[in-house]
Image (cartoon, helix red, strand yellow):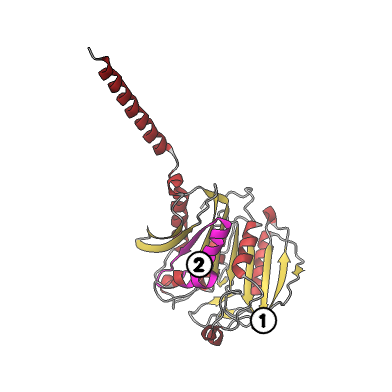
């Protein structure tokens, strides 16, 4: 009898068993480990409340374990153009690539976020769109696909997206460690919904000559509704976080005199669970994102762009310095 046949058969069987074991091992790995090479932009959508909602995810080429997450919310835009607009002015994908962060750019329903204002001019308000549920759904999927750092989930936004950041932080204060609204304060009326159960760090950036969302509060000129004044907003958050009553001034040199505006900084520190509240008041600044590329058209209608600050980099540094301290646990 040719025993070599049995030897070949035994080797083949061993190889099959090894292959099965390898497949079983790969199947047992967390799903996010299979997505590590998928760097760059990824367009996606998700069903929420019977509607298909869109968002764009940026994945850095070097993905830490666990990975921080930043949501970036656009302002009022024409249908379907919000994501491209906010990427253009913030370049937050560059922050994601440099600092190894997942950046999520959601698209609003019909161009507007339902941000807490009584605003019949916004279809999201008229149709009762639940944008908090939209954020919940995106985050749930992201946590399924990636190992998200639950202590480092943040949100920033511009204009309508900034107002929504306040609304989101109040409703999901147990999720978001910090928020950084630019050119947007707390929506009125806020007494019905502003009941955060956990402290949230806040960085507010707002121009004093904003022609759209008034710095001192009142009616918004482009899409309706009212907001609280910027300084009243930060003081309200400082009291909510139980920060020190007295603020300290942050020294900020005017390094670009030709832009026609300059920043002033104020900090309310030592809040609960290590939270801080910071205001960057842009004297002479318009309805703009500091550090973005200024254009004649924008300056004509929206006011001056402050070039003394790179708002995107400043926001990330603030986020990095304010992780969530896991003392507050609340359900939603």
Camera sees residue 201: no
Which residue, given by chain and number where applicable, does mark 2 sit on? 73
Considering the numbered disc 2 on the image, is that residue within a helix, a strand or a loop? strand
Marks 1 and 2 sit apart, C-alpha to C-alpha, by 25 Å
Depth check: give the residue in front, 275 or 242: 275
**Closer to the camera in the image, 257 or 249:** 257
| Magenta span | 85-114
Is 242 a magenta residue? no
Residue at the spot 41% in from the left edge and 67% down from the top edge: 128
Is 194 left, or right, of 24 in this rendering? right
**91 inside magenta stretch:** yes
Q: Position of residue 118 (x, y in %)?
A: 49, 74
Looking at the image, residue 34 sits to the left or right of residue 196; the answer is left
| Residue 168 position in % (x across, y down) | 53, 62
**Disc 1 target residue:** 261
Figure quadrant of residue 8: top left
Image vertical order of residue 289 relative to residue 4, above or below = below
**For residue 246, side relative to residue 95 (left or right):** right
The residue located at (57%, 73%) in the rendering is 184
> Farthest top residue?
1
Pointer 1 or 2: first along the chain:
2
Q: Residue at x 60, y 74 (%)?
A: 291
Label 2 crowding class (10 Å Cα cut-off): few <14, some 14-19, many 20+?
many
Q: Could you say which is closer to the camera, residue 122 or residue 106?
A: 106
Query: Image quadrant for the N terminus?
Result: top left
Does 301 appear above or below 51? below
User: Which mark is nearer the camera, 1 or 2?
Assistant: 1
**How far across and down, in percent of the image, does residue 325 sit?**
64, 50
Q: Is residue 29 above or below residue 49?
A: above
Residue extending farthest to the bottom is: 300
Q: Residue at x 53, y 52 (%)?
A: 62
């Amino acid at each position: 009898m040719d025993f070599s046949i049995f030897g070949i058969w035994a080797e083949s069987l061993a190889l099959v068993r090894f292959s099965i074991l390898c497949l079983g091992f790969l199947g047992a790995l967390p799903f996010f480990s299979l997505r590590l090479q998928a760097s760059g932009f990824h367009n996606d959508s998700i069903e929420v409340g019977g509607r298909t909602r869109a968002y764009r995810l940026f994945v850095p080429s070097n993905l830490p374990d666990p990975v921080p997450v930043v949501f970036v919310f656009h302002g009022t835009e024409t249908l379907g153009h919000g994501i491209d607009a906010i990427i253009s002015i913030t370049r937050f994908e560059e922050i994601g690539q440099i600092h190894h962060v997942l950046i999520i750019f959601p698209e609003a329903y019909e161009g507007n976020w339902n941000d807490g204002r009584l605003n019949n001019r916004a279809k999201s308000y008229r149709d009762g769109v639940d944008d908090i549920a939209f954020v919940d759904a995106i985050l749930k999927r992201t946590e399924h696909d990636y190992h998200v750092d639950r202590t480092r989930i943040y949100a920033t936004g511009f204009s309508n997206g900034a107002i929504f950041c306040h609304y989101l932080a109040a409703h999901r204060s147990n999720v978001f460690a910090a928020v950084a609204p630019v050119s947007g304060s707390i929506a009125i009326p806020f007494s019905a919904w502003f009941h955060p159960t956990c402290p949230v760090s806040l960085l507010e950036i707002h121009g004093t000559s904003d022609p759209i969302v008034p710095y001192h509060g009142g009616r918004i000129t482009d899409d309706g509704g009212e907001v609280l004044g910027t300084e009243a907003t930060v003081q309200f958050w400082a009291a909510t976080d139980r920060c020190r009553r007295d603020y300290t001034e942050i020294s900020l040199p005017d390094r670009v005199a030709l832009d026609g505006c300059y920043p002033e900084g104020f900090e309310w520190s030592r809040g609960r669970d290590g939270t801080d509240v910071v205001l960057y008041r842009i004297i002479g600044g318009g309805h703009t994102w500091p550090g973005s590329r200024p254009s004649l058209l924008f300056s004509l209608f929206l006011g001056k762009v402050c070039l003394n600050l790179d708002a995107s980099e400043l926001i990330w540094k603030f986020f990095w310095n304010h992780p969530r301290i896991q003392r507050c646990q609340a359900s939603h």
